[in-house]
Image (cartoon, grey):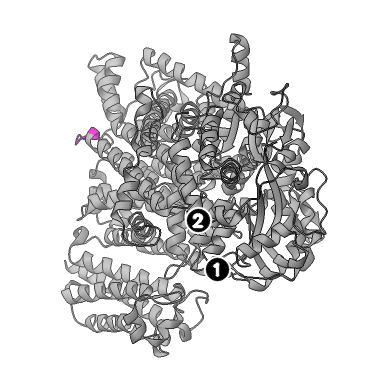
């Protein structure tokens, strides 16, 4: 106890110092540089008539006075004052809006409130950071997280960030579900929207008519997630458990869909299976039937989604497989079990957390997918598209969009709950720090044949899609099969010249390309950091509200991008957090949308690593932060890699949220490509996509090089040898 | 991984948000553009060259742009909204999202352009016009080509006609309103219900049907005729048809966004965009609408309005929020809910 109060004494004082600095010496509002001086600080503003800062300043002064007493961190007064200061900090932001006070009494008390105020700048931002830090320190001193300050800070900071960038905008949008177009509370309208027959109809099962959009969405999600998980498992088994000779090629092919921009796969599938598509035409000729539009609707979306999500499930399942301690399988074999029995009773049960995570990811991705249904949907309506058009269609109805978003959210929560039930409370820990020698069991022959039968057609199909993508951008008009080679499309997008003034970029795609790289490059490491930290906190720290915390982090992922986009515009176009039209809003959007993936991957990896190693580290005197960095992170490298790659490529390929957040100054590649597909410039879209993919491959290689691979026991040796040969 | 590292990362993220320039700088124009990208690009480049004002352009469909302007109402980021069907422009005007401005160029405008301005209380102005019609793929429809709306009901076109969903597309809403004005409301819905048997898909984008027809995915696409002509000019086997019974038309519009960051540049662009020189850029960018300045040369390939039987389209009524909501609800109930 003495040690805790000694160290947190300094930390608490430092946070207090930062708070004082941000209130008195830094510009409170945005637009001024960090070193603009005290003249624009909250204190100066308060002195010049912006009186709504006084309560906050008074709370900070009182805190300073309390800090002079001994053992102030454990006093209730300090905690109470900090909470009061945090409340007043938030209050001052909302009390006065851009154009004036938000309520009459504020306007009555403070005359200058009528002028309004702009968004927070450096001072406002750092004051928030200081309050979060101070709060985390005080609760840690009172025993939160068993007094572990690092964990306490992480939890408080992540909760604050989630509140600001997930709950606040969604709350703002959620309110819209309960109000009518005039802004009045209207429960009847909400009920009418919720119970609309075009949502819940099941007529398609009984043969007479169409199903509701909710039913469509669920059917698609279950089918797509099941197929994608099966395919991902087949791929992971083939790569990790067999001597299949072209593992590297397989890995490379499986990475391709994940780095493919949206729309372009849909376009390729149309070119293959559309009415005038290659395959459709061939089959129709062969069977002498009229070519049909069979691909539009469920079949087309399903093909595109399985192609798109299998790599995600593959990566999740591969890191699960790699982390299964082979001694268990060896023990089973030694005890006389046949290969199939070993697989069924040892490997398969250990795969369950990975399978559940993979299925859940694919299911939620399918629910939120926008690019494929919009290109291939035909008459098959799904929620995400319906929401999109309730927001951008001719009949703008934010309330309806919000209602549909809530249904989508409920679906996701049900999926999450089912996963919890299925996994049960069994222990999946196999990497323990104890003896870890041995080699993973090779796949039973029957399974191997089954796996190959699944994977090979998929390889062929993927190759066909990507040949079209590789060729389509460099021929005159791939839509009409005019295959005269040309570099015209590439030059429209990426023309550049060396002029006297230096390199001049003329192509129409340069702006969006450069912005996209910047945004993805900044967002990916931050996303991974937040995601892995969250996983570690959830899996390893014991604190009040852990379940709610875990659930909260999943929310951002569950809300369809379209709605996230609109809610961000609605919430962040006005003070206090005024960031629409910047690159920052894009980065923030990506961090909180993709962070659950890093978290899931981290959780699946952590579930297999015994706590004893961390406990050993802490027993020997390392703090939470050091243990995380030196012990946990090296063990969950595959998860870090998954998180980094996923967040990077998603930032480069996401479209649904982005379409609302791009601005003339910060345009993104996918928004540009969507425009090209919309305008029927398939060739230009494909050419740009091809370039984007090459750039992404280079970046993924760099990431893999930077992260490296985990080294556990002798298991890596399997990569180099055939499994049939004995290792020694 | 220490608190220092974390806070450094958080600082870096926030530092970005604080340092990113949010307000537009001098000599800039933020242009929201709702025609084809090619045309948008050409317009921004030409204006930039002419005035030295740096144009930051975003292209989105008119529905999306309307939603964005509505969402940004508290703190507008855009200056000018150029292009797109007139209805959302009128709705924005009705809701005060766009600013009143009487350009000195108004006296050079065609009647329909000035009418659009008057309807909106001078918050928008017509910049181009185009008639509604359809286009067919002459490789797929070799004999007895359709010439009238009624021909589209022919059973031989079963599953072979495409039109956009009027909920998402201004083009398709124009068709719905046209049918109501041409036939009477009940008859129009009867017609659309019959046509439904031949529709393979209600697309989301207004011009998607003609692209599908150009690649042979469907035989007939119901679109604005200039969209059909654009496909023909680019070499697709598309024939544009002006329906014999008569048809409606759109008045593509331009509005200045209320409270935008660069009002002066916005007015400069507005005036410039109404000059013949600026309006003639369209033809060079594969856009064959009819320009609104009486002195602008109409592109040779453009379908002439005077050669089409036009109805007297009531923009004020069908551009109003209430009438549109009502018609679309009826469409959803009677057409959209039919089994595919």
**Residue A469 versus residue A212: which sits nearer the camera?**
A212
> Residue B321: which numbered mark, if any?
2
Q: Position of residue A603 (x, y in %)?
A: 31, 43
Pick out the residue farthest to the top.
A287
**Residue A678 versus residue A62: which sits nearer the camera?**
A678
> Residue B181: which numbered mark, if any?
none
Task: Work out whether residue A27 can be spotted.
Answer: yes
Which callout, 1 or 2, points to the residue nearer the camera?
2
Same subunit, tags 1 and 2: yes
Q: Chain of mark 1?
A: B
Tag 2: Cα neighbours inside 10 Å, few (<14), some, or many (≥20)?
A: some
* Looking at the image, residue A409 lies above or below residue A223: below
Is residue A11 one of those drawn in magenta? no
Q: Is residue A576 left or right of residue A264?
A: left
**Residue A54 versus residue A400: which sits nearer the camera?**
A400
- In terms of image quadrants, where is residue B230? top right
**At 54% across and 47% down in the image, what residue appears?**
A652
* Screen quadrant of the C terminus of chain A: top left
Instruction: Find the magenta span and give its range.
Output: A422-428
Q: Position of residue B328 (x, y in %)?
A: 48, 45
Secondary element at image label 1: loop
Q: Position of residue A508 (x, y in %)?
A: 69, 50
Q: Position of residue A490 (x, y in %)?
A: 72, 42
> Residue B22: which numbered mark, if any?
1
Q: Whole-Å distance between the Cαs marked 1 and 2?
A: 33 Å
Secondary element at image label 2: helix
Answer with mark 1 or mark 2, whichever residue precedes in sequence: 1
Q: Chain of mark 2?
A: B
* Screen quadrant of the N terminus of chain A: bottom left
Q: Is residue A406 left or right of residue A63?
A: right
* Looking at the image, residue A267 lies above or below residue B70: above
């Amino acid at each position: 106890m003495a040690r805790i109060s000694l160290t947190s004494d300094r930390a608490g004082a430092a946070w207090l110092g930062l708070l004082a600095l941000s209130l008195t010496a830094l510009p409170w509002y945005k637009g001024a540089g960090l070193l603009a001086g005290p003249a624009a600080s909250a204190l100066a503003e308060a002195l010049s008539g912006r009186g709504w800062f006084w309560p906050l300043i008074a709370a900070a002064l009182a805190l300073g006075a309390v800090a002079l007493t001994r053992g102030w961190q454990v006093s209730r007064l300090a905690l109470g004052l900090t909470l009061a200061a945090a409340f007043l900090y938030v209050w001052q932001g909302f009390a006065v809006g851009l154009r004036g006070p938000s309520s009459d009494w504020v306007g009555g008390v403070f005359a200058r409130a009528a002028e309004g105020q702009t968004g927070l700048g450096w001072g406002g931002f750092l004051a928030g950071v200081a309050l979060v830090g101070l709060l985390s320190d005080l609760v840690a001193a009172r025993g939160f997280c068993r007094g572990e300050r690092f964990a306490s800070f992480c939890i408080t900071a992540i909760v604050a960030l989630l509140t600001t960038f997930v709950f606040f905008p969604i709350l703002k949008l959620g309110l819209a579900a309960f109000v009518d177009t005039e802004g009045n509370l209207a429960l009847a309208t909400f009920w009418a929207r919720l119970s609309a027959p075009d949502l819940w109809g099941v007529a398609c099962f009984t043969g007479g008519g169409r199903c509701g959009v909710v039913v469509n969405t669920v059917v698609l999600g279950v089918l797509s997630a099941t197929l994608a998980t099966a395919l991902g498992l087949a791929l992971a088994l083939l790569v990790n458990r067999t001597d299949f000779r072209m593992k590297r090629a397989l890995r490379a092919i499986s990475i391709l869909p994940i780095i493919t921009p949206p729309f372009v796969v849909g376009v390729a599938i149309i070119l293959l299976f559309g009415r005038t598509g290659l395959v459709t035409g061939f089959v129709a000729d062969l069977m002498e039937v009229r070519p049909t539009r069979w691909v539009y609707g469920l079949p087309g979306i399903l093909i595109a989604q399985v192609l798109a999500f299998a790599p995600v499930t593959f990566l999740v399942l591969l890191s699960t497989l790699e982390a299964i301690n082979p001694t268990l399988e060896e023990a089973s074999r030694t005890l006389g079990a046949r290969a199939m029995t070993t697989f069924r009773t040892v490997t398969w049960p250990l795969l369950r957390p990975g399978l559940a995570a993979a299925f859940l990811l694919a299911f939620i991705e399918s629910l939120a997918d926008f690019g494929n249904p919009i290109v291939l949907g035909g008459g098959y309506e799904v929620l995400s598209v319906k929401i999109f058009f309730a927001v951008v269609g001719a009949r703008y109805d934010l309330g309806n969009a919000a209602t549909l978003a809530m249904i989508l959210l409920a679906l996701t929560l049900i999926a999450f709950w089912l996963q919890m039930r299925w996994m049960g409370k069994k222990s999946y820990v196999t990497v323990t720090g104890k003896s870890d020698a041995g080699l993973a069991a090779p796949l039973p022959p029957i399974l191997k044949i089954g796996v190959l039968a699944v994977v090979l057609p998929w390889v062929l199909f993927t190759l066909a899609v990507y040949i079209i993508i590789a060729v389509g951008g460099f021929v005159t008009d791939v839509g009409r099969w005019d295959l005269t080679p040309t570099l015209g499309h590439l030059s429209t997008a990426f023309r550049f010249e060396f002029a006297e003034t230096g390199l001049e970029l003329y192509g129409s795609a340069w702006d969006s390309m450069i912005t996209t790289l910047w945004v993805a490059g900044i967002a990916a490491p931050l996303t991974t950091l937040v995601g892995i930290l969250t996983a570690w906190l959830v899996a390893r720290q014991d604190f009040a509200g852990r379940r709610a915390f875990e659930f909260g982090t999943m929310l951002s992922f569950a809300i369809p991008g379209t709605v996230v986009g609109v809610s961000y515009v609605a919430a962040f176009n006005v003070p206090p957090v005024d960031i629409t039209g910047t690159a920052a809003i894009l980065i923030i959007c990506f961090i909180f949308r993709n962070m659950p993936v890093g978290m899931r991957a981290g959780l699946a990896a952590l579930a297999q690593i015994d706590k004893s190693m961390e406990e050993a580290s802490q027993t020997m005197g390392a703090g939470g932060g050091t243990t995380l960095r030196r012990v946990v992170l090296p063990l969950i490298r595959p998860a870090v890699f998954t998180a980094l790659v996923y967040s990077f490529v998603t930032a480069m390929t996401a479209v649904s949220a982005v379409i609302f957040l791009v601005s003339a100054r910060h345009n993104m590649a996918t928004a540009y490509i969507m425009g090209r597909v919309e305008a029927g410039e398939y060739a230009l879209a494909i050419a740009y996509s091809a370039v984007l993919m090459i750039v992404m491959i280079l970046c993924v290689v760099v990431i893999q090089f930077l992260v490296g691979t985990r080294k556990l026991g002798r298991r890596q040796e399997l990569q180099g040898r055939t499994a049939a040969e004995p290792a020694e | 991984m220490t608190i220092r590292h974390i806070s450094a990362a958080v600082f870096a993220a926030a530092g970005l948000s604080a340092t990113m320039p949010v307000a537009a700088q001098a000599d800039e124009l933020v242009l929201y553009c709702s025609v084809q990208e090619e045309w948008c690009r050409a317009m921004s480049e030409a204006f930039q060259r002419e005035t030295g004002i740096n144009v930051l352009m975003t292209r989105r469909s008119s529905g999306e742009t309307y939603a964005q302007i509505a969402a940004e109402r508290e703190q507008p980021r855009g200056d000018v909204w150029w292009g797109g069907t007139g209805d959302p422009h009128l709705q924005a005007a009705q809701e005060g999202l766009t600013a009143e401005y009487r350009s000195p160029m108004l006296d050079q405008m065609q009647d329909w352009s000035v009418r659009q301005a008057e309807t909106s209380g001078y918050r928008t102005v017509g910049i181009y016009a185009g008639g509604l019609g359809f286009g067919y793929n002459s490789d797929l429809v070799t004999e007895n080509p359709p010439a009238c709306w009624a021909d589209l009901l022919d059973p031989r076109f079963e599953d072979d006609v495409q039109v956009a969903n009027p909920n998402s597309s201004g083009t398709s809403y124009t068709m719905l309103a046209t049918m109501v004005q041409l036939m009477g409301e009940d008859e129009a819905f009867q017609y659309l219900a019959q046509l439904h048997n031949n529709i393979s898909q209600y697309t989301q984008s207004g011009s998607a049907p003609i692209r599908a027809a150009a690649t042979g995915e469907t035989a007939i696409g119901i679109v604005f005729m200039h969209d059909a002509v654009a496909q023909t000019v680019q070499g697709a086997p598309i024939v544009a048809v002006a329906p014999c019974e008569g048809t409606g038309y759109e008045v593509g519009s331009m509005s200045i966004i209320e409270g935008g960051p660069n009002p002066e540049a916005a007015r400069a662009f507005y005036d410039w965009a109404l000059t013949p020189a600026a309006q003639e850029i369209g033809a060079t960018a594969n856009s064959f609408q009819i320009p609104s300045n009486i002195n602008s040369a109409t592109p040779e390939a453009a379908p002439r309005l005077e050669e089409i039987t036009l109805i007297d389209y009531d923009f004020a009524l069908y551009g109003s929020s209430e009438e549109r909501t009502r018609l679309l609800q009826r469409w959803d109930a009677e057409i959209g809910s039919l089994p595919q």
